[in-house]
Amino acid sequence: MRIALAGAGAFGRKHLDGLKNIDDVEVVSVIDPVADAAAVAAEYRIPHHGTDLAEALAIDEVDAVILATPTQMHAAQAIQCMDAGKHVEVEIPLADSLADAQAVLANQEQAGLVAMVGHTRRFNPSHQWVHNKITAGEFNIQQMDVQTYFFRRTNTNALGEPRSWTDHLLWHHAAHTVDLFVYQAGEPIVAANVLEGPHHRDLGIAMDMSIQMKTASGAILTLSLSFNNDGPLGTFFRYIGDTGTYIARYDDLVDGREEPIDVSQVDVSMNGIELQDREFIAAIREGREPNSSVRQVMSCYEWLHKLEQQLQG
């Protein structure tokens, strides 16, 4: 399996580190118009580098593309990859509008290629452990209480480097949790509300946001998001259910009394990005729909659109 990576920033490197652990996979091209693709290619011994995605798509040997590019480019580039006959995995979010997300789905259905979105929480061992209990009938969600907190008052990425695009609490960070809520609850959302705080003078985005959601059976989601939080950073998930309470902090899981739960045997790795990439590659090889396919995550983007409409109200 020969892979091209578009986007050599902080998250692109996470994919390269994960792909190194997957058998019979070779990254043959790295593309980035801003970051130093040549330096990344040298570090990871990738034979081709460039600044234009079309360069990688023109390489006949490329089977699939992973997009870790700015949000605003995701939908158009995903379509560009499929139009070139390449399978595509696009980092979250699939798009920053419902219309663009729907365009990607329509293209995938016509092309018949594997198109997957990087909703990593589906693959983190901590969340897989909870999902396994749900599917076994041993746990039902009554509430997911989630905090997504960063201190990001300047336009920088996870490495503290300047970004060429602006991040977004609703279309990026809320997408992780909204999709996970639907996935874990196993049923559709029927109601949702959103509030946002003041917009940043320079960034032009809301720096704080609160979201509530409810499924058909009554399970609820309470999601708090902030770019103003000067404290522990990241996303913290509290699952409150009928038979227990579990707290997931990325790949770590504890119960409601903070007793650790061993999730090391849930999957072949503890790296959620690697597991996500393994699913993408396995789906291509097996000719099947992947977990976190464009079709499966569309409900998330439909509800983000509805929440955006509430805010524009």
Image (tube, rainbow, N blue to C red):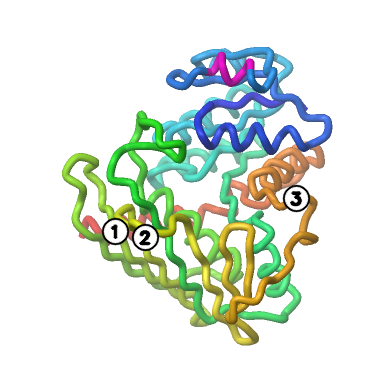
**Residue 95 lies in the magenta-colored region:** no
Residue at figure coordinates x 49%, y 43% from the top left: 94
> Dot 2: what SS?
strand
- Up-down: is 299 above or below 82? below
Q: Quadrant of the N terminus?
A: top right
Mark with earlier residue (1, 2): 1
Residue drawn 54% across and 13% down? 50
92 left or right, relative to 148: right
User: N-terminal of the two: label 3 or label 2?
Assistant: 2
Q: Which mark is residue 208?
A: 1
Horizontal side, residue 146 vs residue 289: left or right: left
- Three-letter code, disc 2: Leu
Residue 140 on image: x %, y %: 62, 80
Residue 20 lies, in percent from the top left, at 74, 32
Residue bearing the label numbered 2: 225
Q: Residue sitting at 61 percent across and 70 percent down?
A: 186
Mark 3 lies on a secondary structure that is loop
Q: Which residues are magenta?
A: 37-42
Question: Which of these two is toward me, 88 or 125?
Answer: 125
Instruction: Give the distance between the C-alpha atoms of the residues marked 3 and 1, in whole angstroms.
Output: 34 Å
